[in-house]
Image: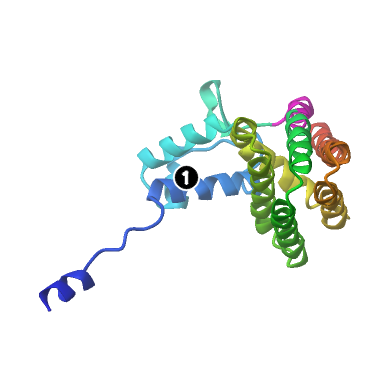
Amino acid sequence: MAGTKLSSLRVTRPQKTLRELTLDQMRNAIIDGHFKPGERLVERDLCTQLGVSRTIVREVLRHLESEGLVATVGTRGPVVAVTTPEQALQIYEIRGALEGMAARACAERRDPKLAAALQAALDRIKAAYGRKRMDLVLEETTEFYRALFAGAERDVAWGIVSSLTARINRLRSMTIKTPGRDHEGPTQMQRIVDAIRDGDGDTAFRAAQEHVGIASSIARALLAETTAA
């Protein structure tokens, strides 16, 4: 009885710390455009908006700076980092090279279970588009590529992509909202999955690079418009 009473009082630990929750909130706010590129991030104001201490805000801003979402500009202090079309091109070039390599490796494995897992991930992306849940589109797209690199057994390459995930999702949050992208993007990704299912490494490589290339063009055009404005 005593043991039962004690166990019922056990405190359930939250899955994430307050710092991690704050980090997620700030990261999403930047990716979603709540905080605009170049906008100052005033610690005092963020403490009030987020309801956390200045210590946590400072730690979160330092972490976001390491992810490339925040920059420190002279006496202005931390601001939302600005991504130029040239920087976007470099990010997409890295994606194209690594994702093409991973897609080819997956196809050459000729593993039906891997192809089925990628198809399931892509189906979740399509469903998220159908529900107009762009946050889920980003989440499921990241999972798709995690499965792609895991299936290709390219953990070092995935580590490189993961280090760019925040910046990739910031660009992706722009491109997925453009007219027709809800259909064109999944259709391009379907070609990657089909080629992997067929064991066609060359086609998988080209399909992955084509998908990234189109996204690159869209993102750089949007960034150029923003810069011109």
Residue 179 shows up from this direction:
no
Q: Which of 127 and 52 is in front in this view?
A: 127
Q: Quadrant of residue 71?
A: top right
Q: Position of residue 165 (x, y in %)?
A: 63, 39
In the picture provided, is 62 more to the left or to the right than 14?
Answer: right
In the picture provided, is 18 more to the left or to the right than 132?
Answer: left
Split into 4 quadrants, where in the image is the C terminus?
A: top right
**On screen, 13 above or below 207?**
below
**On screen, 167 above or below 29?**
above
For residue 171: magenta? no
How is this picture coloured? rainbow
For residue 90: magenta? yes
Q: Which of 41 and 4 is in front in this view?
A: 4
Q: Nearer the viewer, residue 175 or 95?
A: 95
**Residue at position x 49%, y 38% in the image:** 42
- Majority SS type along the magenta span: helix
- The residue that disc 1 covers is 46
Residue 43 shows up from this direction:
yes
For the record, the magenta segment spans 83-93
Q: Which residue lies furthest to the bottom in this view?
A: 1
In the picture provided, is 58 more to the left or to the right than 188?
Answer: left
| Callout 1: SS | helix
Q: Nearer the viewer, residue 174 or 39?
A: 174
**Residue at position x 67%, y 54% in the image:** 140
Q: Position of residue 31 (x, y in %)?
A: 64, 45
**On screen, 25 above or below 85?**
below
Q: Where is residue 15 in the image (x, y as percent from the top left)?
A: 40, 56
Q: Where is residue 68 in the image (x, y as percent from the top left)?
A: 60, 31
Split into 4 quadrants, where in the image is the N terminus?
A: bottom left
**Residue at position x 43%, y 50% in the image:** 48
Q: What residue type is labelled 1?
A: Leu
Q: Residue furthest left?
A: 2
